[in-house]
Amino acid sequence: METLLQQIINGLSLGAIYALIALGYTMVYGVLRLINFAHGDVYMLGAFSGYYLAHALGLDGNPSVLGAIVVTIGAMAFCAIVGMLIERFAYKPVRHHPRLTALITAIGVSLLLEYGGQVVFGATPRFFPQMIESRTYALGGVQITNQNLLIILVAVVVMFGLEFIVHRTRIGKAMRATSYNLQVAKLMGINTDRVIAFTFALGSALAAAGGVLVALAIPRIDPLMGLMTGLKAFVAAVLGGIGSIPGAMVGGVLIGLMETGLSATAYSTYRDAVAFGVLILILVVRPAGIFGSTAVEKV
Amino acid sequence: MLELSGVNVFYGGIHALRDVSLVVRPGEVVTLIGANGAGKTTTLRAISGLVRPTSGRITFLGEDITGQPAHTLVPRGISMSPEGRGVFANLSVLENLEMGAYLVRDRAQIREDLERGFALFPRLRERMKQKAGTLSGGEQQMLAIARALMSRPKLLLLDEPSLGLAPIVCQTIFATIDEIKAGGTTVLLVEQNAHTALAHSDRAYVLETGAVILEGPAAEIADHPRVRAAYLGE
Ligand SMILES: Nc1ncnc2c1ncn2[C@@H]1O[C@H](COP(=O)(O)OP(=O)(O)OP(=O)(O)O)[C@@H](O)[C@H]1O
Ligand SMILES: [Mg+2]
């Protein structure tokens, strides 16, 4: 019972990270029908920009919660800009080309960030400054670290914030219209180019938050860290139903739970395979995912 | 009010519009008829800014709007109900109508226009909270027209509003077009249902493989032997 609870807490905090990243995949897919394969690398850039910012602010070796907040927000802002630049210079020029062109472009951007990252940051892992002193609370027999708590808390706050933006603001309304039908959204007077740029900015900022949060808990960061995590978050988005915001949240948490669940068994070496097994299963059983619609158009 | 001169549109290698010239005067209802693939939708898409002509000029209220992006034409007074209606299926009827007023900041004006839309199509008021995707085809068409009116257009573009509708619903739609005209909005209509459309129009253009082959007062076009043979099944 206690181990189960322990696994659930670990799974939730891992899943919260997947969910933060999955949201970016799903929102971009929503407006552009594009799988932004570079998104996992934006998560990596989030961790690295946080790393450099923390050093620049002299926070290395000086734990400070305020510092952690500043670094997180700084990394989010930096990645928001990177996300918009990627859209503007890589995806926008091929927007009216066949979808395969955009997909290949996305893979190209991803490789550019991964190997460009190795050139700029070096291939050896760096150690993210521990701005929040690690504490472990014992609740009954369950161990929970303050970092895990922070990850879950931030993820929940961010998701409520996103929910608010998407459902209560003008730009959110425009995002929804654009993802239902881009052409018709234009006919409503919506500047869809701006909506697309905003979507990239928002998704990238969420990924950056994920990157910094992970680095606070697991300080080893390297330029390829976005590869596996990005793929798993992508599977989470597909599991939830690509294009669906609640789907990305639920999908992320489910993948996190399954992965930690498996880690606790004799099959723990297969933990990375969970996501891919799930991917194959959804594609066979229910390609639309949990929240995906299979709406039929009326003629 | 609207003038196209020598407009050409290509989709890749397909020459969809060939030197199309046409005029719509204030207060008119003008119909564009033509067979499938003649370029009717493309003409409307060029006017509303969804496709960019490779050559030619489009002027609206005396200003050159050629190649202007669609979203900038809505505040200038052009609104379109697209082919296939394009309602936001996952949004409610009310939310769809509010989307039509996306650029309107004045809540009072939106309320007033909602009332006007519901007066035009009482059915929409009953279905206000329902998801647009669950409406019947005719109701979706009503919604698409009502939504297009929410921006208070000076020129309304309607692409095949009667497509696939039962005769009685068709009548409602055309009666509404008469009302819209009476309210002072200019209408450019694309229709396959040539007979009815011409009866509700002032003037008409006939398109064939991307070019205008006939134009004139609606009654004359309806009487033209070529039109009678090709579109009126006589
Ligand atoms: N997006 C597109 N890409 C390529 N070709 C297109 C595209 N849209 C239209 N066309 C082509 O352009 C021509 C004109 O099409 P358009 O849709 O304007 O015809 P239409 O008169 O509206 O026909 P319908 O009555 O069937 O709606 C057709 O030959 C069509 O195949
Ligand atoms: Mg058409």
Image: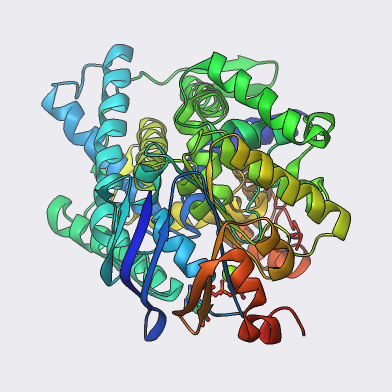
Nearest the viewer among A152 and A31 is A31
Q: Quadrant of residue B92?
A: top right
Nearest the viewer among B39 and A284 is B39
Residue B183 image offset from top left, x and y in percent: 59, 34
Residue B223 image offset from top left, x and y in percent: 66, 76
- Label count reads 0
Nearest the viewer among A29 and B151 is B151
Question: Quarter of the image containing the C terminus of chain A?
Answer: bottom right
In the rendered image, the vertical position of residue B88 relative to residue A10, given as above or below: below
Left or right of A61: which side holds A46?
Answer: right
Left or right of B73: which side holds A86?
Answer: left
Left or right of B170: which side holds A47?
Answer: left
Q: Residue at x 65, y 32 (%)?
A: B95
Left or right of A102: which side holds A264?
Answer: right
Q: Residue at x 13, y 21 (%)?
A: A58
Residue A282 image offset from top left, x and y in percent: 71, 62
